DNA sequence: GCCGCACCCTCCCTCGGCGGGAGCCGTCAT
DNA sequence: ATGACGGCTCCCGCCGAGGGAGGGTGCGGC
């Protein structure tokens, strides 16, 4: 019984894990000691448990969550694929955040000029979709492509519409001003009225920076923004460098007194 | 007193924050309500507080920690620069982890062949430095450059020595086998004896994968690894593609019985 | 047989940034 | 006056540990 059984401290040194970690993994059922003394509660491990123990350490060092590691250890397939996908999305988000922070550091907080403009109601054709937050960019591009494919050449301003409260799934819409109906698309009317408007210069990824400044301006004056945010795409992203893209951001205001 | 004072829920909608968040920021002193009713404890905010509130929201959306945001709000300089540096290091680490996970997914867990070899004691010249974990790569390269600059052409095997327990600061050493003293470097002797050895093929970033496999092999047999890990650099990273780099990993064993 | 030391046990607190909910009270429009 | 909200405080949970309190054990030396 005592042959080759290691108490937790020795086993921890062998596997380069802490005693706390081993107890935690025992508690979660990831790595049960080969023998637990029923009187004292002492945990004893066999050297053969070093490989699964170190596998846990390896995967943890790669930021794989413990529940996923548990499923890997129990032989479930495709667990790591899912982890990989989540890590990839997380990585992309962090890269965007990092780029935004660098922009703030080099250019300061965006303080765009905000103006109040009176917009007429506009008759538009609309293409809609939904996307998780991190896929908004490509999904919007796809909507634009579908819209332009349906209408041919653009004959009016191209507008993106996004809800202000960013939930898990975001309803994305792209609208193009038009004079008549276009088959295969839904026609709609964007409401007119007073809008607060600011201009964003830079990559589409960093639009949230200017949106925040716009909404701060609106909030400071005690207005409540209404309805979806409008993004008027002024530049052609195919021919303009990312950091020169111009976008007008507009939000409808409630009663202006 | 009531002019333009908003209760917490209305202010939360205005700033696109949750009531919970606003209470939390109040508790931390990041954003104190303009007025708190001393009888009821009700918090009231002014529209002018929307800008700092939304700044908190913006920075949080970029993963800036709340304590750092607090220092930004109180006008401290260079806070975001520090945050940026930490984010950059974190991002690099996550990218390495992601690459390692992709390797595991495409090639499976590394299961290198492990052999026990008898090594002679080797007389070497050594260059030492210390580095935080995430800077081990470049610091090691710099040590190699210094070593080669001091010795001229390499006349023996090039070895990296790394402690097994990865602490905050890691002592890095690079050794080159030599027959005589070289001025300006320290001379040393690598101990001989029995070593467990495995071969890593791939980027230096992913050496930990094979190290884990090697140590698992050692641990499974009940041996305790001794002293620093040796990495014998077989390939020239200047002329070999990253995923073909060959490195021998060796660890001294205790008494083999 | 006994001492001491290293080791082991369980239980609880801490960190960050909230979300969820219980249980209670305030505000405001009808 | 009444009900529908909305506000308040307090506590728990998440994740993956680390830290420490307070107490029991294993083993070597005398």
Image: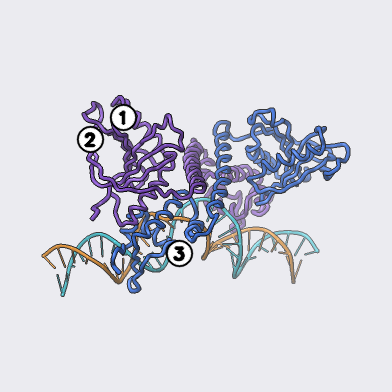
Chain colours: A blue, B purple, C cyan, D orange
The image quarter in which residue A200 lies: top right
On screen, residue A118 above or below A222: above
Question: Quarter of the image containing the C terminus of chain A?
Answer: top right
| Residue A244 position within the rendered picture, expressed as x and y whole percent measured from the top left | 65, 29
Q: Chain of mark 2?
A: B
| Residue A252 position within the rendered picture, expressed as x and y whole percent measured from the top left | 76, 42
Task: State the CA–CA distance, disc 2 to disc 1.
Answer: 15 Å
| Residue A72 position within the rendered picture, expressed as x and y whole percent measured from the top left | 49, 57
The image quarter in which residue B248 lies: top left
| Residue D14 position within the rendered picture, expressed as x and y whole percent measured from the top left | 52, 59
Q: Chain of mark 1?
A: B
Camera-side mark, 2 or 3? 2
* Marker disc for residue B147: 1
- Kind of element beneath mark 3: loop
Task: State the CA–CA distance, disc 3 to disc 1.
Answer: 48 Å
At a point 54% along the width and 57% down the height, the residue shown is A77
Q: Chain of mark 3?
A: A
- Residue topped by disc 2: B123
């Amino acid at each position: 019984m005592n042959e080759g059984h290691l108490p937790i401290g020795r086993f921890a040194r062998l596997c380069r894990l802490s005693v706390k970690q081993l107890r935690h993994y025992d508690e979660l059922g990831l790595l049960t000691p080969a023998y637990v003394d029923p009187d004292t509660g002492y945990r004893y491990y066999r050297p053969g448990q070093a490989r699964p123990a170190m596998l846990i350490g390896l995967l943890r060092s790669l930021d794989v969550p413990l529940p996923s590691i548990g499923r890997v250890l129990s032989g479930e397939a495709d667990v790591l694929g899912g982890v990989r996908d989540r890590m990839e999305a997380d990585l992309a988000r962090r890269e965007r955040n990092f780029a935004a922070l660098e922009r703030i550091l080099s250019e300061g907080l965006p303080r765009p000029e905000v103006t109040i403009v009176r917009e007429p109601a506009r008759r538009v054709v609309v293409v809609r979709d939904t996307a998780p937050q991190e896929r908004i960019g490509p999904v919007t591009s796809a909507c634009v492509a579908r819209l332009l494919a349906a209408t041919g050449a653009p004959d009016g301003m191209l507008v993106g519409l996004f809800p202000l409260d960013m939930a898990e799934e975001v309803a994305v819409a792209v609208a193009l001003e038009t004079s008549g109906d276009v088959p295969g698309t839904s026609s709609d009317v964007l409401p007119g009225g007073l809008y607060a408007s600011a201009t964003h210069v830079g990559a589409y990824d960093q639009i949230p920076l200017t949106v925040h400044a716009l909404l701060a301006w609106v909030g400071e004056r005690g207005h409540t923004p209404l309805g979806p945010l409008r993004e008027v795409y002024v530049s052609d992203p195919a021919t303009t460098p990312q950091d020169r893209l111009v976008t007008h951001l507009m939000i409808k205001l409630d009663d202006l007194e």
